[in-house]
Image (cartoon, helix red, strand yellow):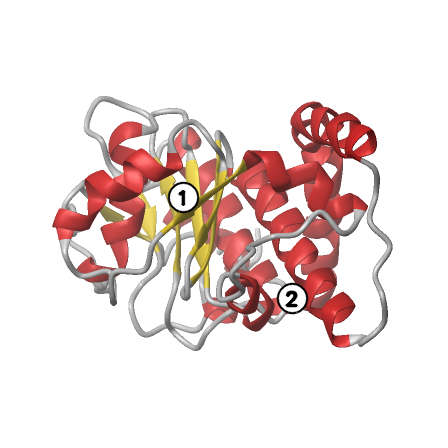
Amino acid sequence: MSLATLKNSTKRDHFSDAEWSIRVDLAAAYRIVALFGWDDLIFTHISARLPGPENHFLINPYGMMFDEITASSLVKIDMNGEVVGENEFKVNPAGFTIHSAVHEVRHDAGCVMHLHTPAGTAVATQEEGLLPLNQTALLVREQLAYHEYEGVALNHDERPRLQKDLGEKNMMLLWNHGTLALGPTVREAFMNMYFLERACEMQVASLAGGRKLHHPSDSVKEVTAKQGEKGLAAVSGIAWTALLRKLDRQLPGYAD
């Protein structure tokens, strides 16, 4: 057994198999976000719910860049954003405000992602929100909620309003702020975020072209929306496996 393998197995001994699997997927998600250029220095977060009655979650260590996060460095916290057990890393409790709002009422949310990308924030700043301009937007637009900006999300009093606005939807534009996506697993939350972010990028590019836009018919909008409700989860597994291969080539070490 190599020293690296021994070191990794020692880290794994501290966690159940179920927790370790979630840790590896969540660390991978952080690094894939970095590969895609969606990170914002040490800010924004991706959280994952752990199994069990304790209502514990994993989140990034505050101060680490997304491309250096590993499975073992993720921090376990409670619903208040407080660290559970001993840990050499710290978290930003305020960063969990939005996530805790979702996790509190959406017990189907195994993972919640929140980003501040230029394209996502640009569309969240446009009065019409996400427009039905292309296939990608049509796949997700009917699954998209909106929440009004109330300042930096430090106030827990905002949570009931965010929860009401989100409802049963799995994607959200936070007006003047950014994007949010959730799913039962890390890979499904990531796939929802990928399509939302991609649609925002396409909208910014389309509007920047300065040409008259071609709009799909209402009947096509309806058909594509129904396809999106069924299709994103179905492809999340094979897409995630391909992303992990890409990560292993370009930014390995997330499973340490």
Amino acid residing under circle 1: Arg
Q: Earlier in the sequence, mark 2 or mark 1?
A: 1
- Pick the front one: 81 or 132: 132
- Residue 240: quadrant of the picture: top right
Q: Residue at x 25, y 66 (%)?
A: 151
> Of helix, strand and loop, which one carries label 1?
helix
132 left or right, relative to 143: right
Q: Residue at the spot x=57%, y=57% of the render?
A: 2
Q: Quadrant of residue 64?
A: bottom left
Q: Check residue 12 in the rendering and tell me which mark sits there, or answer none.
A: 1
x and y percentages locating residue 118 in the rendered image = 56, 73
Above or below: residue 172 compared with residue 235: below
245 relative to 78 in the view: left or right: right
Residue that badge 2 annotates: 36
- Decide if residue 120 is on the left or right side of residue 59: right
Tell me residue 14's x, y (percent): 31, 42
Residue 18 can be seen, yes or no: yes
Amino acid type for the residue under numbered disc 2: Phe
